[in-house]
Amino acid sequence: MNKKATAVNLEGKKIVWVEDDQLLSDIISRKLSQTKCILFRTEKGEEALKIIDEKMPDVIMLDIILPGMDGFEILRRIKSNPKINRIPVILLSNLSQASDIKKGKSLGAVKFMVKATVTPNDIIEQIKEVLNDVK
């Protein structure tokens, strides 16, 4: 773990969380609320893009398998919009094939995390690491 990343304070940082698994979303949201970040949650692609455009978050956490527009398409749209394309995107999905990871990274994700292999604390540490790298 990056010690500098641990020192990053999430208080006041804006995070958009796009996830359709309500249980996981609730667990991570509770954990993130302890950091005093500003969290925006949705499970819909169009709504996510609107929130991102309006709120200009510091980081985006994005699932891939979503109802309607999938996470890859959301990521494509984020990266093709000059207003929001510099916002770091972390993909968090049950998809774990090398081809999915490669596709996510090639579309511009800064990290790809497999849900089955990470804890809520891992997710927060990855967010901190990404924000530390953006400084």
Image (tube, rainbow, N blue to C red):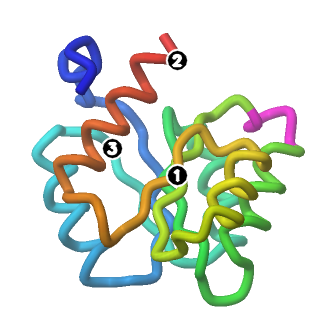
Measuring from the top left, give residue 29's x and y in whole percent. 24, 61
Q: Pinpoint residue 128: horizontal percent, then vertical percent.
A: 32, 30
Look at the numbered disc 3 and give the secondary structure of its residue: strand
Percent of width and height locating residue 103: 75, 58
Q: Residues within 10 Å of mark 2 (few under 14, many from 20)?
A: few
Mark 2: amino acid:
Val
Q: Quadrant of the N terminus?
A: top left
Q: CA distance from mark 3 to mark 2?
A: 18 Å
State yes or no: discs 1 and 3 in contact (Cβ < 8 Å).
no
Q: Amino acid at mark 3?
A: Ile
Between disc 1 and disc 3, whose residue precedes?
3
Residue located 76% across and 36% down the image: 85
Q: Position of residue 10 (x, y in %)?
A: 26, 30
Dot 1 surroundings within 10 Å: few (below 14), some, or many (20 or more)? many
Q: Amino acid at mark 1?
A: Phe
Q: CA distance from mark 1 to mark 3?
A: 22 Å
Q: Residue at x 27, y 20 (%)?
A: 2
Q: In whole angstroms, how far apart are the C-alphas of marks 2 and 1?
A: 17 Å
| Label placed on residue 38 | 3
**Front residue of 74 and 4:** 4
- Check whether the beta carbons of the residues at disc 2 and disc 1 lie within 8 A of each other: no
Q: Which residue is mark 1?
A: 112
Circle 2 sits on which residue? 134
In this rendering, the answer to whether 97 lies above or below 57 is below
